[in-house]
Image: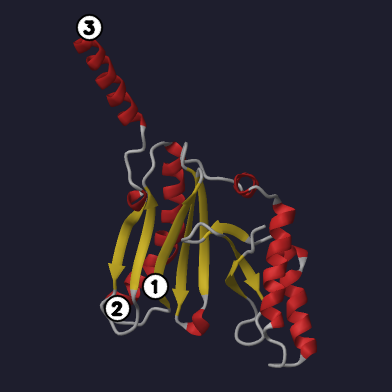
Amino acid sequence: MMKKLLSILLAVGLVLGLAAPALADGDTVTDAYAYTTGEEYGGEYHIPQINLDGPGAAATNAAIWADLYEGYMYDVQYAAESGEASYIMGIDYSWAIRGDVLSLLAAVRYEANDLCDYYVYNVSLTDGERLSDREFFAAMGLDRTGFNDRLRTAVSAQYDAFAGFTDDDFIDLQRASSLADETIARARPYLDVDGALCAAALFYPIAGPERCWQLFPLAEQ
């Protein structure tokens, strides 16, 4: 009887072990592709992949590949092979897990003015499906209005720090552009490496390009 009970417990343990996530956190996101130019101009390029099962994760990985590899690496590789300098200086990424949400941020870095393109991929760990902003907000316990309010506070604080550096009227003009409804609507929510709520948002600086993408940590209540 005792042997039979032990056999049942071992079988249950095996089933539970198979049902549990097979990957440690450190293995959940890894390089799908890495490239180093080895030249004076250029850098390192890392294309991530999400190591989850299911068609949802496969679709997200296909989107990542299309965005980052097909979108940028052909130009990088052509420049390296032809001995030219690439204007794309590197691609890197960071990610975090909070509850059932895996949030991945990829950054494409340019030579000029420290400009970056940012790509955000928020997915469910349960099924690997990519989350809409509404689903992401719900998992974070807020809605779009709350997110927008926090983003506007963070953006305004950035302009407050510019006081005295240039004409106040110009600062107010740039602030209004960054806080416009159509600008805020394009912001992309994500989690930083510590799992804190952040946003990649369009920003109108007081110097340099007309506008650029910038990262903003958002105060949580």
Precedes in sequence: disc 2 or disc 1: 2
Q: Is residue 187 above or below residue 12?
A: below
Rendered residue at 31%/21% (across/down): 12
Disc 2 and disc 3 in contact, CB within 8 angstroms: no
Identify residue type, mark 1.
Gly
Q: Residues within 10 Å of mark 2 (few under 14, many from 20)?
A: few
The first of marks 2 and 3 along the sequence is: 3
Badge 1: how crowded within 10 Å, few (<14), some, or many (20+)? many
Helix or strand or loop: what does disc 2 sit on?
loop
Q: Name the amino acid, label 3.
A: Met
The residue identified by callout 2 is 82
Label 1 sits on residue: 90
The picture quadrant where one finds residue 157 is: bottom right
Q: Position of residue 136 (x, y in %)?
A: 60, 48
Q: Quadrant of residue 55?
A: top left
Look at 30% across and 85% down and name the residue there. Answer: 40
- The amino acid pointed to by label 2 is Ser
The quadrant of the rendering that contains the N terminus is top left
